[in-house]
Structures are given as C-alpha cells and as structure tokens.
Image (tube, helix red, strand yellow):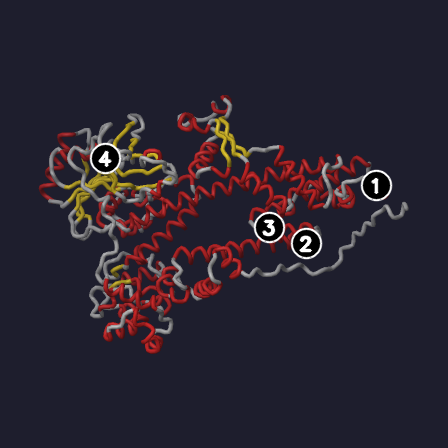
Amino acid sequence: MAEENTIEENSTEEEFEWTVLELPNYIDIVSKWLDFKTFQVETVLDLIAEWATVPFIARYRKERTWNLDEDNIRAIIELRDKTEKLHKAKQTAVNGIESMWKMTDELMANILKAKTLKEVEEIYKPYKSKKKTKAMIAIEKWFQVVADLIKKNREYEIPTNLLEKYSKEEIVEWAKYIIAAEISANADLRADLIETLQKYWNIVSKIKTEKSLEKLNDKDKGQISKFDIYADFNQRISYLKPYQILALNRWESLKILSIKIEKSEKTYEGLQFHYARLLKIRVPFIDELEEAFKDGYDTLFKSVETELRGILSELWEDDAIETFKQNLAALLMTKPEYGKKILAIDPGYKAGCKMAILDELWNPLSFDKIFLHQKDSSIAKLKLILSKEKPSVVVVGNGTWVNETVEMLQSISDIDIYIVNESGASVYSAWKTAKEEFPDLDSLDRGTVSIGRRFIDPLSELVKVPVWSIWVGMYQHDMPEKKLEEKLSNVVEDVVNEVGINVNTASSYVLNHISGIDKRSAKKIYNHRPYKSREHLRKQLSDKVYEQAAGFLRVPESDEKLDNTDIHPEQYELAKYMLENNIWPSDFEKNKDVLVKLYPDVAVSTLEFIVDAYESIWEEKRVNSTHKKAIKKGSVEIKEGDIVEWVIRNVVAFGAFVDIWMKNDGLVHVSQIADKFVSDPKDFVEVWQTVKVKVTGIDEKTGKIQLTMKGL
C-alpha cells in the first residue's frame, strides 16, 4: 500500500513533436460572425489579395460581392485580420509553453478556448516572465499530484516520498498555488465571470480622499467640480452610456476618481458552483480547495476587471469615432465655393489678427495684420484692404476673439462674413505638407491661408491636415491616436473617391487618397499635368494602379464624354453599346448574351450604375451648404431668450451641439430636443440639419451656451 502512495520523479526530457494548431477557416468564421454569404467573404479576401482597394471593390466589383459597401468590406478585412492575430497568438503561447516542457491538457484546452487576445495573453503571461511563479515552482517540486488530490474535494493522502522532503503544511500550501493558477487561467470560468459582470453588476466610482486631491496641480483641481455627478457614481454595467464611460476614464486618469467593478458574494458563489461542475464535485469545498479557489478567484476577478474596463473603453471609442466619421464626412461633402476672391482672417489678440488675401485660384497674394486693441488703426487698415483688394467675402476662423473680429468688420462694411472651423489649422501650418506647399511662408501665414481655403474647398484643404487634428467630434485627445487616424482616414478615402476628382486641378495631396495611388504616383500624376483623357493618364501609371484609380478621376478636357463619369474604362464598351441601342436595366434579360460578351461580370446593377453615372455627368456630388451662412449684422452678440436658426454640427448620446458660428458650440441637451421623451438624439436630429433653437443659458465664465428646441 505504501508503495502505491508514491510518485516517480522522472527528470529526463522525452522527445516529442511541437504542436501545430489547426489553421482556422477564416472564411467560415467571418461569414458566420458578420452574417454574410461565404462566397461574399471569399470574393473580398481574394480581391484584397490581388491588391484591389476597398473603394474599387465597392464600386466596380459589386456584381461579385453582391453589393457589399465600403463598411462591409472593411468589416470583413478587420475580422479576418483579428482572427488571424488570435490564431498566431495562440500558436506563440503553445510554442512558448511547450518549449519549457510545462504544457498540460488543461492549459492547452484553455488556450484553444480563448476568444480574445487578452485571454491568451493572461494564460501565457506567467510563462513569458523570466521570474517563475509560485505555481511553476510547485509543479517543479512535483506537487501537481497533491493539487489533483485536493481537487477531488475529499480526504486525501500525500505521497510518502514528498513527505520525506517537505512538511505536510508546505506541500499543501504549494499545491494550493497550482490550483489558484489553474482557476485564474481557466477559459470557461473567465467567460462566465465576464458575462455575469456585464449583465448584472455595477461599476462604482468614488472621489479620491482630500489628501489625494491635494496632490493635484492647480489645473486639475479646477476640473473637480465639473464632474460632481460622478463623485458617488453607481451604475449597472449593461446600462452605461458611452459618454459616461469616457467621463469615468478621464477623471480616473486625472487621479480625481477611483473606479472599480462591484465585487459581490453572489458572483463568488456562482463561479464556485461553475468550478465544481468542471471538477465534477459538489459544494461545499474542503478547506484547502476553498482557500485555493478564493486566491484564484481574486486573481481572475482583477484580470477580468481590467479586461472589462478595456471592453467598455472600446465601446465609447467606437461610439465617438462613429460620430467623428459622420461629422467629418459631412464636412468633406461641403459644396465648394470656387471663383471668389477672399480675405481670410485668423483672429487673435496679443499676436494680432493675421490676414491673407487669396485670389480666385486660391493663391495667396498678400499678408497683413491688425490688432483688436488698436481699434482706430485696425479699422483704417481694414477699410483700405477692402477698398483696394475688393474681396468677394471675408472668412474668419472660429478661434478666440472671433466675435470681436466680426463686430469690427460689421461696423465698417456690409460684406458677407463667414466663420469656418479652424481646427487643425495650427497643426497643418507646422506640418510637412504645409512646408512643402509654402516653404517661404511662416507658420502663421500658412495657417491663415488654410482657413481661407477651407471655405473655398474643405475637401481639398482638409486632406492635407492630420485627420486626428480636425475637431468635428468630441474628446479626440482621449482616444488612441492610431485607431482614430485609421478610421477617419477611411472616411477621407471614401469621400474623395465618391466625389470624383479633376485630375488636372487636384493637388497631389488629394490624388494620394484616390484608390490605388500612393504618394509617389500622386506626385508623378501631378507633375505631368495636364491630361487630355484617361487614356493619356494611363501612360503615367502601371496597369494595376490605372485599373484601381481610373474610374475615380475626371478629365474635363477629354473628347471622351465617359471620362467625366463614374463609369470605369473597362465598362466603356458596354456603356456605349447601351447608349447606342437604347438599352435600359429592364432590358437586361433579353440582351444578356450580348452584354456578357462586352462585360463578363455584367448584372442588372451594372446597367443601373451606368445609367445613373451617365445621367449625373458634370454633377457636383458635394451638396452640404446649409452651414455656410453669412453672419447677419448684429448676430454675433446673443442673449438669453433669443430664438434663432442654427445648424447641428455634432450629435452625441447626451444631445446635439449646434454651430452658432462662434468659438463655442451651443448644446441642446437630450432632454431639450423634443416635447417628448428622447432615447437617442439621432432619431430626431442629424448633422448639418438646420434647427430653430432658443438660448436658455449663457455661462459668462466658460462661454458655454445652453439651448432648447422644445416648443419650437
């Protein structure tokens, strides 16, 4: 009997083959998750592998994808990449653990079950560390067998050969480390805990102690009163709004709040029952197992809390980015104002108001400066400039001192004055693109030119600016810059390609956003202008780049009418046949045999596309212009009770921000949008919608303006 109650220590390392994980079926995974047909996913991934761009696939390969749009295509690509990264992370973890000869069946099962990178990282983390964990040391001491005995949840005997080296208490203590580590790494328990916390438990915030707050700098101390509502916050995780998550994160990062997820006895007991089911035992646990479970639970809870906070942060990031995308797209789709001479002004006080005259072709002619505190001389200079240069309009940036600048202009002239959002102008002025474009100008002059050009053509100007610097949303500085830039760059790409660009007038910066065109190709196209046709343009590009780009570029000087449509050159033969024979989409079936010979992928949607493209030739797709209203005389000064028509610039979960053509937007809180309950402001208002609002409050200190739409 004594001989049976021993373990054999075999320190020789047996040779074995490293485990190669089965490659996931990416097409099946993506199609099921996104609810697309497998052939749609396969087609997109095949086209991407052939270096096709997203805009090209969405417009010119829609017959193959069954009309997937840009967002659908990007979702497929992103999920495929995410799934591939997860697989590679699992393989890395398996290789790493096996190389240490520490892989167990349970570890392998947990790695295979892991659904996120975070889960894999948590499992692999102890093994990546140069420092051994207590559980690893316990396994090396051959205490795994004791851990397994404890997990049976009944009386047990420790192998005698272990007792010869260690005391019973020491052996049990080390065995509990193994069990606790297994619990904290268990994929099933992790998934259960995440689901339970997400559905039923709360996130709690408390304001830091007075002693902690005293350590803050004066600037951060001044922020404390702004978030009194979160000083004693307690909300079900499933009910959290994205903006609440943002507020909690922000004030935690400033060390004003301490935040945690509620830890309850019910959660503990529920997970304990789950663990018992996995072990096929019953509760209550013996003392040793109870203690090990508690330690493992504490470690797992802390890890899951971190992961859940990350999930919540990603939720508000995605929500905020969606708002940015909508607002940026609307801004870029602003109708251009060509052919106007402009006086552009960047308002300031100490450094003065920088001014630039731009001719009808957007070129800067001259620069000057006025000082608001030198009223008489500034008015005299403005009168001279307006008289001499005779600009069509004055464009003023919406920075500090915009109100005073507009008032001074209105006191001497009836010229139309427009206020534009100057966000990113200062970043652009010091950016490499500005230095390339205006190497002889200082940064202030470059910024002023940018403000004027934003009125002329926001699309052409804003593509030069880093997208993260264009303030058309909220909280950009709280967001991961890489993620924000990637998502907003997609918007720029989509809008540029949707609009259709005149290849003979576009800057290289705009051309760089055209499907298939990189910086090198853009400069090559720009340097060899003008072009007489798309075919002429072809000489500057490789066959692949031409295929991807041609349909998005216009050549107004071309004798080929189709060169100024969305119709791709590969579709010209089909389009001409349709036009010459008066064939419409309804005629598809009876002409199918002939049409397929002209364009193999032809479908009814192809004919519809060609008809729409031909009928809209020369049509400007940028139509947003409601926010381009000249400032009325006397409208700069507003007071409580005023009722005016303004334009919505931003819609968020807690309301709508209205562009009042001043430095600060006015806020219509969600409770003030309609005369009935509003759950989601987007159901009632949208970006660039003109709305009638009443001023209900003006904060003299902050300049914040409260508005209402109720009763209007």
Q: Which residue is mark 2?
A: 98
Question: x%, y% of residue 683?
Answer: 35, 43
**Secondary structure found at label 1:** loop
Looking at the rendered structure, the kind of residue marked 4 is Val
The label number, if any, that marks residue 114 in the structure image: 3
CA separation in Å, label 3 and label 2: 18 Å
Question: Residue at the spot x=34%, y=62% of the render?
Answer: 521
Query: On residue 402, which mark appears?
Result: 4
Quick one: SS at disc 4? helix
Between discs 4 and 1, the one toward the N terminus: 1
Name the amino acid type tagged 1.
Glu
Q: CA distance from mark 4 to mark 3?
A: 55 Å
Element type at marker 3? loop
Dot placed on the residue nearer the N-terminal end, 1 or 2: 2
216 up-or-down from 565: above or below: above
Nearer the observer, disc 4 or disc 3?
3
Image mark for residue 584: none
Tell which circle, 3 or 1, labels the residue nearer the N-terminal end: 3
| Residue 263 in the image, given as x and y percentages of width and height | 59, 33
Front-lying residue, 322 or 240: 240
Residue sitting at x 45%, y 29%: 230
The residues bearing labels 2 and 4 have C-alpha atoms spaced at a distance of 66 Å
- What is the distance, in whole Å, between disc 3 and disc 1 at their CAs? 35 Å
Say which residue label 1 marks.
Answer: 157
